[in-house]
Image (tube, helix red, strand yellow):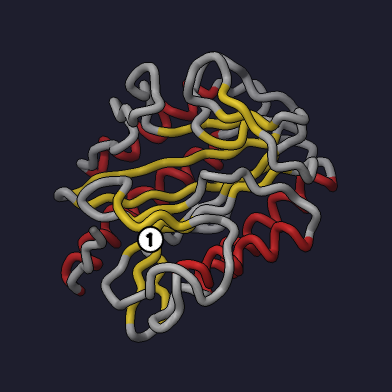
Amino acid sequence: MVELKTEASIDAMYVAGQVVGRALTAVRQAADVGVSLLELDAVAREVLRAAGAGSPFLGYRPAFAPTPFPAVICASVNDAIVHGIPDGYRLRDGDLVSIDCGAQVDGWVGDSAISFVVGTPRAADLRLVETAERALAAGIGAAVPGNRIGDIAHAIGSVCRAAGYGVPDGFGGHGVGRRMHEDPPVPNEGRPGRGLPLRPGMVLAIEPMLIGGGGDGFHAAPDGWTLRTDDGSRAAHTEHTVAITEAGPRVLTARQAV
């Protein structure tokens, strides 16, 4: 069931979203050659702690997961698409990193993700990240009353496919509210004019996931959480929590540029 949020609820979700934005900005600023993924998780934990926010990631265990998630961020490096578990891995020059983070404030959740390159970037990685951001912007632009979920999916998928990138099937965005994952699912590829109508008060996490090699294949790593590209190519993941309003899409997880 899709819950329509009131204007007051959306304002409360904006507070949580701004905490997420600050956490992602802090993690991006801390990410450098030699810094471990666990150290980046510690940076995000401190931002959440200082804001009095909880983490919807920490301890989360969906049906597919063998264990509860042990961190407040997902840290996915190079061929990892999403759900990477922070560990002692130290970032290397040229690594492509995707960080996903959530915050819960007064019972409301914000959820967002960024991708970036550490150190000296490859041109191909910069193009992949830039395309992910364009796909996210296209998806957000389609999140208006009168459109349907398929319009968001089509907008995202069209950008990804036109650039020659793969799109992992079965993984995408979702509703957000009191829980991190609510109805409806928001695919990253689909047919325009199809699916659930978009109404004011819906709040969605819109999150393109791109596979750089062009194929769609992926598999779960031995940890049971991390999804990796089948062809070993690099991946990018971006996300914002977006409220659908009469005035247009309202991004609740906007962050400072780094």
Q: Amino acid at mark 1?
A: Leu
Query: What residue sits 21% from the left and 61% below the top?
Result: 12
Query: What residue sits 47% from the left and 41% below the top?
Result: 100
Q: Secondary structure at mark 1?
A: strand
Q: Is residue 255 visible?
A: no
Residue 3, x across and y down, in percent: 21, 63
Residue 47, x across and y down, in percent: 34, 39
How crowded is the residue under tag 1: few (<14 C-alpha within 10 Å), some, or many (20+)? many
Quadrant in the picture for residue 101: top left
Residue 114, x across and y down, in percent: 55, 47
Residue 59, x across and y down, in percent: 29, 25
Instruction: Please indicate whether residue 88 sits to the left or right of residue 204 in the image.
Output: right
The residue closer to the viewer here, 151 or 25, is 151
Instruction: Please indicate whether residue 251 sits to the left or right of residue 132 in the image.
Output: left
From this view, report whether residue 231 is shown above or below residue 145.
above
Query: What residue sits 62% from the left and 19% below the top?
Result: 90
Q: Is residue 152 visible?
A: yes
* Residue that badge 1 annotates: 204
Instruction: Please indicate whether residue 234 sits to the left or right of residue 169 in the image.
Output: right
